[in-house]
Image: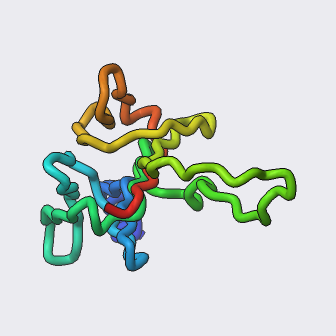
Amino acid sequence: MRLLTYLVLALFAIPAFGDTVTTRDNVSVNGKLIEMKTGVVGLETHSPQGTEQRYITLDNIAAIEFNSALYNSAAPPKVFAIAPPSPSASVQKTPTPADTVVLRGNERKDCKLAGITSAAVVCEGKGNQYSRILVIRIQVVPR
């Protein structure tokens, strides 16, 4: 009985990381996102072999999800909806696609991702910085 108690306590003492990077070929890598600069995302991951840092280039990333909890407990928020075009829709010039930052409350902001620090998601342009506590997901457009 005492051994079982120690095992349960050890299980809850193991740190889990809630950030998830999904690559363009649909591989999900869970860990703690350390930073992003010069187009490379650094992620601290854990495996039976120990802790390691993995680096993924931004052009290979489809999405980055942040979770302030210790683990991802639910499916990611729906980012896109697929529907037939509206019959009244006129042909418009397609704007240059931008990355999309999804904030809590499902608020979406267009963003050309410039970097990620331990405290913020930084977009190009003045005043385009969002606290990582508020950011749920970044949808990255192909580079």
Q: Position of residue 106 (x, y in %)?
A: 62, 39
Q: Position of residue 33 (x, y in %)?
A: 26, 51
Q: Position of residue 54 (x, y in %)?
A: 17, 65
- Is residue 11 visible in the rendered image? The answer is no
Viewer-proximal residue among 103 and 85: 85
Picture quadrant of residue 3:
bottom left
Q: Residue at x 42, y 48 (%)?
A: 99
Q: How many marks?
A: 0
Q: Residue at x 50, y 36 (%)?
A: 109
Point out the residue furthest to the top here. Answer: 127
Q: Residue at x 29, y 34 (%)?
A: 124
Q: Position of residue 125 (x, y in %)?
A: 31, 28
Quadrant including the N terminus:
bottom left
Viewer-proximal residue among 109 and 7: 109
Picture quadrant of residue 62:
bottom left
Q: Is residue 60 left or right of residue 54?
A: right
Q: Is residue 31 left or right of residue 69?
A: left
- Is residue 39 visible in the rendered image? The answer is yes
Picture quadrant of residue 81:
bottom right
From this view, report whether residue 123 is shown above or below residue 95.
above
Viewer-proximal residue among 14 and 111: 111
From this view, report whether residue 136 is shown above or below residue 7.
above
Viewer-proximal residue among 142 and 21: 142
Q: Is residue 133 left or right of residue 89?
A: left
- Chosen colour scheme: rainbow
Quadrant including the C terminus:
bottom left
From this view, report whether residue 57 is shown above or below residue 88.
below
Q: Residue at x 37, y 63 (%)?
A: 142
